[in-house]
Amino acid sequence: MSYPKIPSWNYSMPAALLLMAPFDILASLAMDIYLPVVPMMPEALGTSPAVIQLTLSLYMLVLGVGQIVFGPISDIVGRRPVLLGGAALFALASFLLAGTSSASLFVALRLLQGIGASAALVATFATVRDVYAERPESSVIYSLLGSMLSFVPALGPILGALIAERYGWQAIFLVIGLLSIVAILNAGMRWHETRPTTAAATIALRPIFASFPFWIYTAGFSAAMGAFFVFFSTAPRILIDRAGFSGFTFSVIFASVALVMIATARFAKRFVRRWGIAGSLARGMAMLLLGAVMLATGEMFLQAPLVGLILPMWIIAVGIVFATAVTANGALAAFGNTAGTAVALYFCVESLLVGIAGTLFVFLLDGDTVWPLAGYTGATALITLAGLRQLPKKAI
């Protein structure tokens, strides 16, 4: 398949990653960095733990739903204005979050922060699709972005714990805002427009909605990212409230899961080359399913929150890397001119599934136990594996 000509993008891969990765990382950092202070936030804002959980869930939802707006806009007006505008809103919301003590205002500003992050994220991934669509570097750059992103849950909570301990929780959002300004200034000088010069000026949703591979690979992405979402939604309650670990110790334990992801990502290219896209996703889902069984077994028989949660989560972490290394290529392979719209739907569906289903598992099952994680991970992995069996051979 040939794609329309795009404006010149002459950066080397390392230079391109240094330009694009900060926006991907900041979108995740805004969720991960304040996990160590989640247990103290209800008292700080005069609200309930459910409202604090809502700030995590709403951010995830808005991160995806906002992209259904910004993806098509980026196909029409370009990637650069969507990126810079979204990043500016993200930075503004971060600075305002640092100065609020109202629970309702905190929730509203988290919504604005999620909107800004969604715009920057869809512009970033659409740019990757624009530049690397027909180049062998495509799987490499997705894996590298995933590897960099793995450092966020490894270092973000530790950084958040250290900042909060010395300067208070408000300083966490101040740091996010300052980092955003640095990324915006860099992009303002170096981020050239990459939208195809003959890109469609219409929003073509039907071909994307009609693509069965798009839905299966997006379901796999949702299973993988949702496993991590439910993990960080419940881990503070299990490890801090239930097991009695300090915020810093929790952050180190939490980081071990991310380190497993980082180590696995080093071999992602080799795995994909050996197993193919569908084979890598199938093995990733099998690891998620194994982790879910281990979680359930540990909760019923071990009654040891640390071992019963972390060991199975290391297995799940390997599966997350196997899945996320290939789901974007699998879901977006058939779309060229409408890459922005396809990326938007990809993240929108994932965020809706994760935000709604993941939150329901946390609320309906006991959030102080591993049951929400075991339930979500096992159910979504089984659904994805069933869908993979139905894929046409030419889509595998």
Image: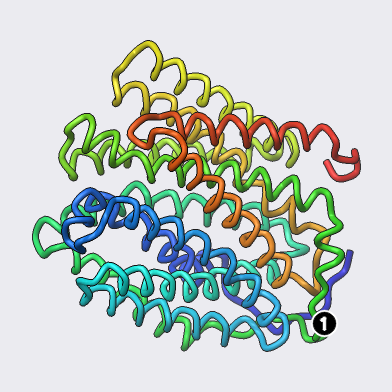
Quadrant where the C terminus lies?
Answer: top right
Asked if residue 251 lies left or right of residue 188, the reply is left
Image point (72%, 86%), residue name: 76
Most foreground residue, 372 or 155: 372
Q: Residue furthest top?
A: 301
Secondary element type, mark 1: loop
Question: Label 1, on which residue?
Answer: 200
Q: Residues within 10 Å of mark 1 (few under 14, many from 20)?
A: some
Amino acid carrying mark 1 in the image:
Ala
Residue 235: quadrant of the picture: top left
Image point (46%, 47%), residue name: 229
Image vertical order of residue 247 relative to residue 374, above or below:
below
Expressed as whole percent of the image width and height from the top left, the position of residue 112 reads 43, 76
Quadrant where the N terminus lies?
Answer: bottom right
Expressed as whole percent of the image width and height from the top left, the position of residue 202 reads 81, 82
Image point (23%, 65%), residue name: 172
Asked if residue 325 lies left or right of residue 158, the reply is right
